[in-house]
């Protein structure tokens, strides 16, 4: 497609108002050059590379393992303090989740309904107004009175 | 051969679940699995496991440690040179540990470490083409749980799968043992465990309990701990008499 496309001449690109287009064209050119240059370096395997997979070589993530340094009953107070802190942090995280008794999803759903309701309500109100207008024309709004000094 | 989750896999088997899934979902391949285009092959023998959301890995029995970035290991200092220590972590190559990678260490204030000391360190660099590099501080320069291990403990080695078993969040082993005695453990992912308790008997008891846990099912660990507790009590009373 780019081959068929007529290219903008250099002198036009040099013009002041063509600045942004010029940048775009230059970027494209750079990309093309790069592909030409490194194209034969790409192996078949690299081209097939999909982004579906993440490689994680450690078991720590897979099995959610703990740190491996533990102490109990005051053998090493420093380590125990750190362990306690970690536990507290975890508790806080869990509590934060529990404290909000309405989840974000519920809230979103609720707001959706609310909006719908207001729409229908508005319609209803409008229809009421119309009816009123038809039946017994509402008392006219009092005219604006110019203040008199 | 095609395998699915829960099966025993051999190197070269393809994972059926992943090849058949067409959903656009990111899949995490843990240890023991590798990818060739869109098919996933196992390269270790073991049991194929899956954890949520989509983490696949091979649960295998292994004794040879292959360093991975971010893992905690117990190492033995084998060499002291001008600015780095060489540390044996049980891998194919010795790891290097800079003397500046300790809490509060400066060029003038060097950490007091001798050849033969034990360190509990974190792997900062672990690549198959390069020497592994250890650190004893976190990114804030604090020591936290890392650092030198005192020399009055005991070191023993075990299989890597046992380490994973005792470090699992659901493992009751440590909590059970902690009911009856005080102790301290540093378990490295490289299959080295350092234990320290109040007396030699207690230390041996902890070490035995950890080693015995390898072949005990989760339900059997409670019994194992109480057995060890009893034996320990008997030997202690024997000593007193």
Image (cartoon, coloured by chain):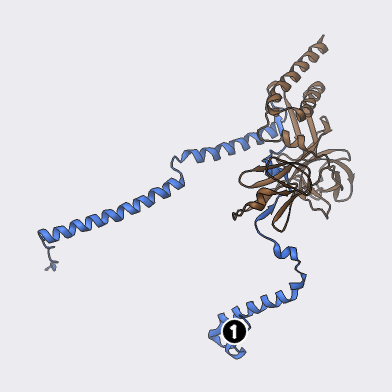
Chain colours: A blue, B brown
Chain letter, disc 1 residue: A
Where is residue A43 drawn, in percent x and y? 76, 66
Name the one closer to the observer, B154 or A4: A4
Q: Residue furthest top?
A: B241
Which residue is drawn at the image coordinates 60% and 89% (left, top)? Answer: A9
Residue A109 can be seen, yes or no: yes
Where is residue A39 drawn, in percent x and y? 74, 73
> Does residue B124 lie above or below B119 as drawn?
below
Q: Residue furthest bottom?
A: A11
Which residue is drawn at the image coordinates 82% and 11% (left, top)? Answer: B238
**Mark 1, residue position:** A5
Where is residue B119 drawn, in percent x and y? 80, 40
> Does residue B126 lie above or below B206 as drawn?
below
- Position of A8 with respect to B181 (left or right) is left
Which residue is drawn at the image coordinates 11% and 59% (left, top)? Answer: A135
Which residue is drawn at the image coordinates 78% and 16% (left, top)? Answer: B231
Residue B187 can be seen, yes or no: no
Q: Residues within 10 Å of mark 1 (few under 14, many from 20)?
A: few
Q: Helix or strand or loop: what does disc 1 sit on?
A: loop
Corner quadrant of residue B114: top right
> Does residue A111 lie above or below A72 as drawn?
below
Corner quadrant of residue B196: top right
Name the one closer to the observer, A113 or B38: B38
> Does residue A49 lie above or below A57 as drawn?
below
Name the one closer to the observer, A1 or A122: A1
- Position of A127 with respect to A57 (left or right) is left
């Amino acid at each position: 497609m780019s081959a068929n496309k007529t290219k903008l001449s250099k002198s036009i690109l040099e013009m002041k108002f063509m600045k942004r287009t010029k940048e775009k064209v230059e970027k494209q050119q750079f990309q093309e050059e790069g592909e030409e240059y490194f194209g034969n370096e790409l192996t078949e395997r690299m081209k097939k590379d999909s982004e579906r997979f993440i490689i994680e070589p450690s078991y720590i993530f897979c099995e959610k393992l703990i740190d491996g340094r533990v102490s109990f009953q005051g053998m090493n107070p420093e380590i125990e303090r750190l362990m306690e802190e970690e536990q507290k942090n975890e508790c806080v995280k869990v509590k934060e989740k529990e404290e909000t008794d309405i989840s974000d999803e519920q809230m979103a759903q609720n707001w959706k309904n609310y909006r719908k309701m207001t729409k229908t309500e508005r319609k209803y109100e409008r229809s009421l107004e119309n009816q009123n207008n038809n039946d017994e024309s509402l008392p006219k709004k009092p005219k604006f009175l110019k203040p008199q000094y | 051969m095609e395998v699915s989750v829960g099966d025993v896999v051999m190197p070269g088997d393809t994972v059926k679940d992943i090849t058949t899934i067409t959903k656009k979902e990111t899949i995490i391949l843990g240890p023991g699995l590798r990818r060739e285009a869109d098919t996933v092959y196992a390269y270790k023998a073991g049991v194929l496991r899956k954890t949520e959301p989509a983490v696949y890995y091979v649960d295998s029995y292994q004794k040879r440690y292959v360093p991975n970035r971010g893992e905690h290991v117990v190492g033995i200092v084998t060499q002291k040179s001008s600015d780095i220590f060489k540390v044996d972590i049980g891998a194919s190559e010795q790891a290097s540990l800079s003397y500046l990678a300790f809490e509060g260490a400066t060029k003038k204030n060097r950490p007091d470490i001798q050849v033969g000391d034990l360190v509990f360190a974190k792997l900062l660099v672990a690549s198959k083409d390069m020497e592994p590099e250890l650190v004893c501080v976190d990114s804030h320069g604090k020591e936290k749980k890392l650092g030198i291990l005192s020399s009055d403990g005991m070191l023993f080695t075990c299989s890597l799968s046992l380490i994973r078993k005792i470090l699992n969040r659901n493992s009751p082993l440590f909590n059970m043992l902690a009911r009856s005695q005080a102790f301290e453990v540093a378990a490295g992912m490289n299959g080295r465990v350092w234990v320290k308790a109040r007396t030699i008997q207690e230390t041996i008891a902890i070490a035995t309990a950890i080693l015995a846990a390898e072949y005990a099912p989760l339900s059997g660990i409670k019994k194992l701990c109480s057995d060890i507790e009893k034996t320990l009590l008997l030997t202690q009373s024997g000593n007193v008499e």
